Image: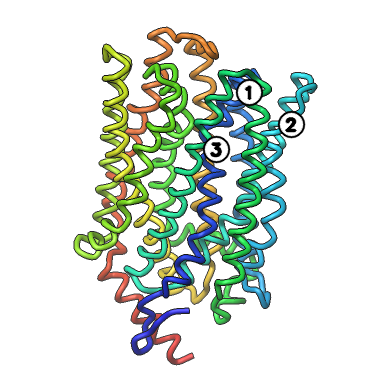
Amino acid sequence: MTETVGKRSVRVPWRTVFAYGAPSVGAGYMYLLVGLYVMKFSTDVLLIAPAVMGVIFSISRIWDAVSDPLVGYLSDRTVSTLGRRRTWMAASVIPIGAAFVMVFSPPTDLSETALIGWMAVAVIGFYSVMTIFFVPHLSLGAELSDDYHERSRLFGVRHGFYTFGSILCLASFQLLLLAETRGELAVRQTALELAFIATLVMGLLIAFAVVRLRERVDFQGRVNERPYRAFADVVRNPHARLLIIVTFIENVGSAAIGVLTLYVAQYVVGAALWAPLIILSYMIPSAFSVPLWIPLSRRYGKVRLWLFSMLLTGVSFGGMFVLPFLDTVDVRLITIMVLAAFAGLAAGCGGTISTSIQGDVIDYDEYLTGERKEGTYFAAWNFVYKCAMGVMLMLTGFVLQAAGFIPNEVQSMQTQIAIVSLYSLFPLVCYAIGAMLFRRFKLNEQAYAEIRSVLDARRASA
């Protein structure tokens, strides 16, 4: 699985890196389509009230309080010839496809109540079954290397694949936005066809990863038999505790960005059909800057670089508050695309470095407890991420409704300011607070090297 020098893992072969990153293409596509389009699809096509959809997304986050920790812990506890993580990844293929198709295929003859029920089951179901893939897949990445900087390469490639899937999704956005000009039935048909294609591709990519990857047998069975003790270890870990707080604050801000991008493009910028290009101006720097951040992290340190990415993200989106006050569509477009490009650079840094640092924190847990519970840790971070999204999705739905939002109509200045405040000023405040807190993080390269030497000595004597 890895090339070695002495007893230390140094380099993960490219074939392994590629196999690990590949399923993230499908995950990036699906998450973007659900995260950015389902709210608009529900309010503008299905005519469900924004507040109702906000509640549905929030309920899905509440359910994640059960599903994420359960999958993470059971993944840690799994003993199988296929491995702890690949067993769950393989089991996720059919449920993911069924739930994703359901999101975009509500029958046309449903009553209002039945339609709300359908979307509730579909959205909650989708996020639940994606957990079956997502948590074990992240956990596997932390197991493939225990080198401080090689982890950044692994998770950087994963971020690049994920962002590439998001870029591919932009073509679907364009098709869906064009379908909106032809009416409700055209949107429904287009969305369903795209969902079927994405389901097939995602299944093939997961199968490819399951076949090509291998797992460390010595990590199996090394987790506490009592689940509450495993999660108590996460809370007791000071580095994990700080990351949980920072992750929640950071993602509360970024969740509003995700759900409101299409609203900003249509109702603030006044260029709905340009939304895919606005998103593309964010995605391209995010994906293609990954090779830049890996050597920079070696020079300046992962902790400093992630701190920089938080500040750059906040400032980039904060600048978008001026959009409603600019005179022309062209000026608004140029402004949002330039600022989105800077935010994309920051996202490339954060996507490369943040998960790598989380892997280091998991090794610190092994240093304290002697256990390997990547699933438990990534379940905790994934749950915090989803909670943040749920809070903001519910808040966004109520703010849109309270501000007088009317689907498919020109919005008042009051409504535009409400939208852009959530989209820009709120993330700016969140990222600034997150950066201030993250300055207290102490698990840098020197501290990691000390615990790594202890762990290597333990393994050598085992």
Q: Amino acid at mark 2?
A: Trp
In whole angstroms, how far apart are the C-alphas of marks 1 and 2?
13 Å
Q: Nearer the viewer, residue 291 or 129?
A: 291
Instruction: Decide: few, some or many residues near mark 2? Use Cα within 10 Å; few <14, some 14-19, many ≥20.
Output: some
- 223 with respect to 447 (left or right): right
Q: How many marks?
A: 3
In whole angstroms, how far apart are the C-alphas of marks 2 and 3?
18 Å
Q: Residue at x 58, y 59 (%)?
A: 205
Q: Position of residue 289 (x, y in %)?
A: 30, 51
Q: Amino acid at mark 3?
A: Leu
Q: Residue at x 58, y 31 (%)?
A: 38
Comparing labels 3 and 1, the label whose residue is closer to the camera: 3
Element assignment for label 1 = helix
In whole angstroms, how far apart are the C-alphas of marks 3 and 1?
19 Å
Which disc number belongs to residue 118?
A: 2
Q: Position of residue 77 (x, y in %)?
A: 64, 69
The residue labelled by disc 1 is: 52
Which disc number belongs to residue 33?
A: 3
Which disc number belongs to residue 85?
A: none
